[in-house]
Image (cartoon, helix red, strand yellow):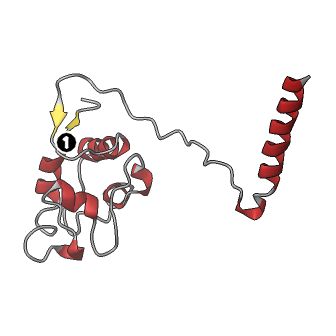
Amino acid sequence: MRISALLACVCLLIFAFGCNQGSNFTLPPKKVKPESAAPIPAGRYIAIQDILTKNCMPCHSGATPAGSLDLTNYNGVMKGGAHGPIVLAGGPGVSALYTKISGPNPQMPKGRKPLSAQDTKAIFDWILRGPVNGELSHPIVNH
């Protein structure tokens, strides 16, 4: 009898606490499944830094990089520029680094030939997997 009374009290307290949350009560965020990345073959890499150096450094380096965006190192990439961050780890579709170089009419690199499909895919997958400091490299996905 005492156990069921104790259980009833605990349930009542939980219910009362939940009801007192009012408009401040929110459900935890729903987990969103990230876009799927291709499997990584072992031992084959494209250096993301090499892609950035070849395609982005003419404008996004030096004492006054375009848009205050310094792409010469990991910290600069992750910091972003005058318009804010350019990489959201796990979200290439909302990361300016990827959205500006992709699509039918890429905005970047400005005034230059668009990145190859392979380089664009490498950056997509690198962002999707969550770039880590010191890991400016990415396995080749489809070669």
Q: Is residue 7 above or below residue 50?
A: above
Badge 1 crowding class, 10 Å Cα cut-off, few under 14, some 14 to 19, many 20 or more, is: few
Q: Looking at this rendering, what residue extends furthest in the front direction?
A: 2
Q: Name which quarter of the figure residue 100 lies in.
A: bottom left
Q: Quadrant of the N terminus?
A: top right
Q: Name which quarter of the figure residue 140 lies in.
A: top left
Q: Position of residue 54 (x, y in %)?
A: 11, 55
Left or right: residue 54 versus residue 106 is: left
Q: Quadrant of the C terminus?
A: top left
Viewer-side residue, 84 vs 40: 84
Q: Name which quarter of the figure residue 80 lies in.
A: bottom left
Q: Position of residue 119 (x, y in %)?
A: 24, 45
Q: Looking at this rendering, what residue extends furthest in the right direction?
A: 1
Q: Residue at point 23% right, 68% down?
A: 110
According to the image, label 1 marks what residue?
135
Q: Residue at point 81% right, 44% down?
A: 13
| Labels in figure, total | 1
Q: Residue at point 36% right, 61% down?
A: 96
Residue type at the position of mark 1: Glu
Q: Secondary structure at mark 1?
A: loop
Q: Residue at point 38% right, 57% down?
A: 95
Can residue 6 be seen? yes
Viewer-side residue, 31 vs 39: 31
Q: Position of residue 24 (x, y in %)?
A: 70, 62
